[in-house]
Image: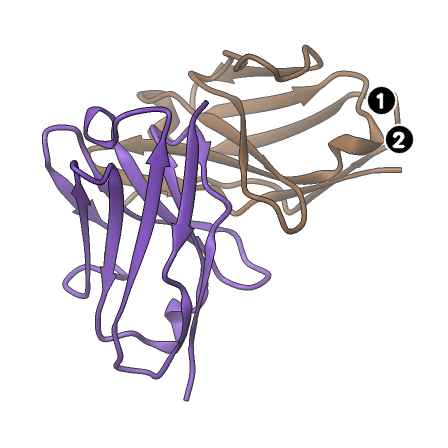
């Protein structure tokens, strides 16, 4: 059974950093394309980043240069390093496998 | 970058057919997916490749495509189908979601 469990969310001040994790089970992270998608409170879904099986990575313009997606094959875990955080980054962050299976999300709040 | 346009809301009575449209230039060359999201829950894939239904999704959910528009159809909508629905597509490493449609079944 495919399972995705996000963690690492929390309250951070503007300009701060946070690293989100997405622990996967039931499949191999490196064999699929893995994405991060976020949802601001009361708003719609917004794609954030993707890493393909070959290692190529892509980002939404809104996070380019500030966020970094990566994976640890030995831990079968996906990450999202978020730097220079802004209030508008406040959202629930979901990880997804092949944009088909999703985790339950982790809340990131950027506020002073 | 691409854009996908959905109506903000659709309302039907139980047992009626609900149709939610999604329009965008990218849909002329790339497949669409549809996600269902209920309050406080993660999105669930209900349609992929415009019209394919994942296992476990009820048969009343179907999808179709014509030109730059895709349509999610729920035949005989149930109260439990009340949710937000998002279309999605990707091309040239541009990934886009529609703004979402709130389906009310009452």
Hue used for the chain lettered A = purple
The quadrant in which the C terminus of chain A is found is bottom left
Mark drawn on residue B16: 1
Q: What element does badge 1 sit on?
A: loop
Q: What percent of the width, then of the height, locates residue B30?
A: 33, 22
User: Is B95 or A68 nearer to us in this picture?
Assistant: A68
The 10 Å Cα crowd at callout 1, few under 14, some 14 to 19, many 20 or more, is: some
Residue corresponding to mark 2:
B13
Circle 2/circle 1 CB separation < 8 Å? yes
In the rendered structure, the answer to whether residue B61 lies left or right of residue B77 reads: left
Q: In the current view of this chain or complex, which residue is farthest to the front?
A: A74
Q: CA distance from mark 2 to mark 1?
A: 6 Å
Q: What element does badge 2 sit on?
A: loop
Q: What percent of the width, then of the height, locates residue B45?
A: 52, 27
Hue used for the chain lettered B = brown
Q: What percent of the width, then of the height, locates residue A36?
A: 33, 47
Q: Chain of mark 1?
A: B
The residue at 52%/15% (across/down) is B54
The residue at 22%/40% (across/down) is A75
In the rendered structure, the answer to whether residue A32 lies left or right of residue A11 reads: left
């Amino acid at each position: 059974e495919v399972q995705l469990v996000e963690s690492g969310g929390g309250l951070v001040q503007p300009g701060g950093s946070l690293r989100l994790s997405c622990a996967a089970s039931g499949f191999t992270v490196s064999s699929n394309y893995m994405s991060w998608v976020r949802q601001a409170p009361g708003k719609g879904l917004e794609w954030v980043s993707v890493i393909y099986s070959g290692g190529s990575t892509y980002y939404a313009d809104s996070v380019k240069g500030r966020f970094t997606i990566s994976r640890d094959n030995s831990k079968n875990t996906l990450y999202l390093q978020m730097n220079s955080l802004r209030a508008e980054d406040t959202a629930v962050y979901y990880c997804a496998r092949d944009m088909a299976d999703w985790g339950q999300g982790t809340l990131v709040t950027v506020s002073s | 970058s691409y854009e996908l346009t959905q109506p903000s809301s659709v309302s039907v009575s139980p047992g009626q057919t609900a149709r939610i449209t999604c329009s965008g230039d990218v849909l002329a060359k790339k497949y669409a997916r549809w996600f269902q999201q209920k309050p406080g829950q993660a999105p669930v894939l209900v349609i992929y490749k415009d019209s394919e239904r994942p296992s476990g999704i009820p048969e009343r959910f179907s999808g179709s495509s014509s030109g730059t528009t895709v349509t999610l159809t729920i035949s005989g909508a149930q109260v439990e189908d009340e949710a937000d629905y998002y279309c999605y597509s990707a091309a040239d490493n541009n990934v886009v979601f529609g703004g979402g449609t709130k389906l009310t079944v009452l």
